[in-house]
Amino acid sequence: MSKRKLPLWACSAVKHEPAEDGGSTVKPDAPIVDMKQGVPTSVKNEDAPKRRLRSNYVFPAEETKKPDTKVEYLPFIEYTGAIEYYTTLQDMAFRCDQLMQEITQQLQSTDQDIPIAFDLEWPFSFKTGPGRTALMQLCVKTDCCLLLQISCLKRLPAALTQLLYHPRVVLHGVNIKNDFRKLARDFPEVDADRLIARCVELGQWYNRLNGSTGLWSLARLVEQLLRLRMNKSKQVRMSKWDVLPLSEDQKLYAAIDVYIGQKLYLNLAEKQRQQENVNNCVPEANIDTKICLKCNTANPIMSRLVHVLRAGRLPYQQALKLQQTIANRLLQQAKHPQDSVAPTSPYCNVLILTEHEPVYTIGIRTKGYDETEEHRLRALGADFVRTNRGGLITFHGPGQLVAYPILDLKRFQPSVRWYVCHLERTVIELCRRYGLRAQTTADTGVWIEDRKICAMGIHASRYVTTHGLALNCDIDLGWFRHIVPCGLVGKSVTSLAQELNRPELGVASVTEEFLDCFRHTLECDLLPLGGESQKELMDGI
């Protein structure tokens, strides 16, 4: 008879001999019996077929497990970087504006998005439940953490919301979506869905990279990935985050949360690169969103910090010189960005608020106003000035709020049409708050029916604006009878005081409402310009 081999299941049984402890041991080379002679014959392992009991069964590969280290033996996280703590709207707006500029400069040298660790803290009571959001933590670089005490605010600074919504910024954290929903409940101007659409959930990212399905807290993820331990002291974690000032322990606790979050992001991004072995990886943040997304946006949102200069009553020529001084510096910044001044400089975006002594001004369209007309108008007791703004003749005088926004539109929207439209919207919103239905027409300015309440004329050079708008508050309308305002025959001029029958409604009482409408419409933060900065500008004219 021919030599026969045992079936595979029998070979497996022969190779596994019972051990003393009831288990089995495997012999390296199991004999195969010659059925004719009954003599065992050795067969080398490399010639043996792959062992399996059934056709659909595969022996699992042996896994090498990391030695378990007890949590109490792991070292605590040590953070030695800077902690910047802000409690006022002005300080937060200014710092976020600086951060926007830093991110904009960084984006010029990379096509990768900028990750920012995000977290919130709020007080909690077992009787009343969670309190209002008290603290927002941000970390862009691992050597600096920002703590913003937003419990002091009624609304978030515009610069902060622009930072959160920036198309090239990726906010990340553990259970971060719940933080966004909490923030939106406490600050209705926040769009939680918009933030959630681009955020990165670190726990889900770790699961995808490792093929796991766990639910992670920040502390557990740090232990698993970084082999470090977080100090989650209940005394600090459950403390009163809305009571100022925060203690040093609270500040360190809050800073560590975002510092270690940024370390986790960088660690996961490196692991992703190693797995895919591709330099420009695109790991998924969720089903629809990507973490490293190349941005084709030509005009990322830049600084929208505007300094308000209350110049009082000025002669028109001095106001022109003041505008030109600020505009020249803005143009110089645009031409030589490496020499740009700090955002605290009085030569950044400035909104000049003023009133003028009686003056007739004419723009680049001078039809019908020659030297004879100029002498006639001067004889009325008013000055006469020719300017480079758009539009025809108009009048400025006491009782008229004149606003000159000296803005770099590249920091807003590089479009003169967009700018004029938003100035008109500002005045329309102001009138609405006083119960007046204002509108725009085919003619420039803002109108109440066929009566102009606000004249507009601007000049823009390389997207740096000068001139602006003139809102009639309680101005003497008799001055307009000597001209055809803005060259519009058959149209009249009105004022807030006349429309509302409130003679006391002057410039001083309207200014604050105007500033709020300006801030809301142009989505900017307004800071008062005073002290040495204002003195420097006013001395120059």
Image: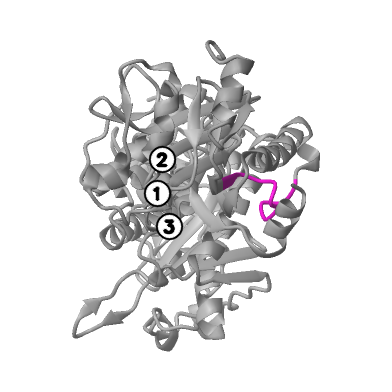
Q: Which residue is mark 1?
A: 514
**Counting other residues with Cα less than 10 Å from the Cα at mark 3, is it few (<14), some (14-19), or many (20 or more)?**
few
Q: Which residue is drawn at the image coordinates 41% and 89% (left, top)?
A: 235
Element marked by disc 3: helix
- The residue that label 2 is drawn on is 471
Compared across the picture, whether 151 is left or right of 139 comes to left
- Of 348 and 107, nearer the camera is 348
Q: Is residue 213 above or below residue 456?
A: below
- Against 261, residue 487 (above or below) is above
Q: What's the amino acid at mark 3?
A: Ala
Please name the amino acid that badge 2 sits on: Leu
Asked which quadrant contains residue 370, the reply is: top right
Q: Which residue is mark 3?
A: 508
Asked if the residue under mark 3 is in contact with the one under mark 2, i.e. CB atoms within 8 Å, the reply is: no
Say which element carries label 1: helix
Q: Earlier in the sequence, mark 1 or mark 3?
A: 3
Question: Could you tell me which secondary element the residue under label 2 belongs to?
Answer: strand
- Residue 437 left/right relative to 171: left
Say whether disc 2 or disc 1 marks the residue closer to the N-terminus.
2
Q: Position of residue 249 (x, y in %)?
A: 53, 84
Q: Nearer the viewer, mark 2 or mark 1?
A: 2
Q: Which residues are magenta?
A: 341-351
Q: CA distance from mark 2 to mark 3?
A: 12 Å
**Residue at the spot x=36%, y=83% of the render?**
238
The type of colouring in the image is: one colour
How many C-alpha atoms fall within 10 Å of the one at disc 2: few (<14), some, or many (≥20)? many
**Badge 2 vs badge 1, beta-carbon distance below 8 Å:** yes
Residue 264, visible in the rendered structure: no
Q: Is residue 498 magenta?
A: no
